[in-house]
Amino acid sequence: MADFDGKRGLVLGVANKRSIAWAIAKRLADGGASLAFTYQGERIEAGVRELAGTVDSPLVTECDVRSDDDVARVVAEVGEAFGGELDLLVHSVAFAAAEDLAGRFTDTPRERFWMALDVSAYSLVAVARAAEPLLAAAGGGSILTMTYLGGERAVPHYNVMGVAKAALDSSVQYLAWDLGQKNIRVNAISAGPVRTLAARSIAGFPTMEAIVEERAPLRRHISADDVGAAAAFLLSDDARNVTGTTLYVDSGYHAMGM
Ligand code: NAD
Ligand code: 0WE
């Protein structure tokens, strides 16, 4: 498990101990990585600082991914903390207005459509561009984002988040092409439903888990730690020639037609 000895990473999207980003961070830290964290909003600052402290993080700083100023400042701080180099970048951020994850996609207003795409898709492009010099200075690196099947098929109520994931998935491919020239890899994990903060507030979440247990080839739902294990592979040098791809951690659900 010393795959990440001497590696330096930036993790966006830890809200609490249930966050997928935290499961990924734990795996990387166990493997020897040094990790910087960002959080959004004072409400979760103390919790994120406490978690980051358990893995001896050198940097915990605020980042609202809608703000170019925040993104630039964070990357500057990361550069200072890690001597101008970065090896790993974990993007685990998404948001849509709660009212748009219920009812009809058809009714999504223009402003909230763009807000969901800004936070959930454009942010990967913004952060990748800002971090590119640090990743290139390290001789290359690995970027990972989190996606969901609702970006490829219509999942009832996922709605505008599905459109945002479609944009995110495509961004992974275009970023992979641009950044591949600098030995920077860009991949996604498509996770099945996991009971995180972002998921628990969604009505019918237990029903989704039950559907996975009934219809997925492995007939069980997944955990954040399952995502952490797959993330460790994609972020490691074992995946040195893997880029522009999506790895499904969903008990095989995506392979089914019924
Ligand atoms: P989570 O609530 O723990 O993480 C979501 C994170 O997004 C939070 O840390 C939140 O602070 C952050 N965020 C929201 N708006 C932001 C903004 N403007 N600026 C910066 N950060 C912002 O929930 P999670 O389930 O761990 O979600 C992480 C990722 O995994 C998301 O991309 C989500 O779409 C994806 N995903 C989740 C599931 C699931 O079932 N939980 C399945 C597949 C993919
Ligand atoms: O990507 C997600 C959820 C992301 C998310 C969650 C929330 C809840 C709170 C984005 N924005 C918000 N906004 C809030 O106000 N998932 C993959 C989990 C998820 O969410 C669903 C799902 C699944 C699966 C919503 C409807 C249907 C299925």
Image (cartoon, rainbow, N blue to C red):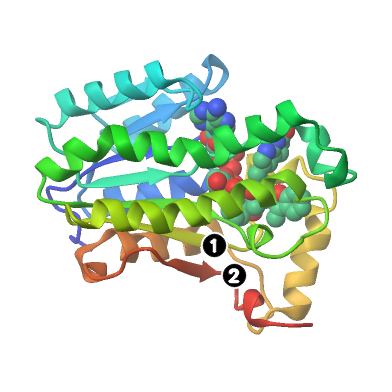
Q: Distance between the residues labelled 2 and 1?
A: 7 Å
Vertically, is 233 above or below 109? below
Tell me the quarter of the picture where residue 11 sits. top left
Vertically, is 200 above or below 253? above
Q: Name the residue beneath numbered marker 1.
A: 190
Among the two numbered marks 2 and 1 on one chain, the one whose residue lies closer to the N terminus:
1
Amino acid type of the residue that numbered disc 2 sits on in the rendered structure: Asp
Q: Position of residue 138 (x, y in %)?
A: 11, 45
| Residue 15 visible, this orientation | no
Does residue 2 appear to the left or right of 166 in the view shown?
A: left
Q: Is mark 2 on a helix, strand or loop?
A: loop
Tell me the quarter of the picture where residue 27 sits. bottom left
Q: Which residue lies furthest to the right in this view?
A: 103
Q: Position of residue 113 (x, y in %)?
A: 71, 35
Q: Name the residue beneath numbered marker 2.
A: 250
Quadrant housing the N terminus: bottom left
Name the quarter showing ligand 2.
Answer: top right
Q: Position of residue 130 (x, y in %)?
A: 29, 32
Vertically, is 174 above or below 242? above
Ligand 1 has an atom within 8 Å of the beta carbon of the residue at disc 1: yes
Disc 2 crowd rating (10 Å Cα; few below 14, some 14-19, many 20+) is: many
Q: Which residue is rendered at x = 43% and y = 23% of the image?
A: 63
Q: Position of residue 98 (x, y in %)?
A: 78, 34
Q: Is mark 1 on a helix, strand or loop?
A: strand
Of residues 17 and 73, the one nearer the viewer is: 73
Of residues 75 and 41, the one nearer the viewer is: 75
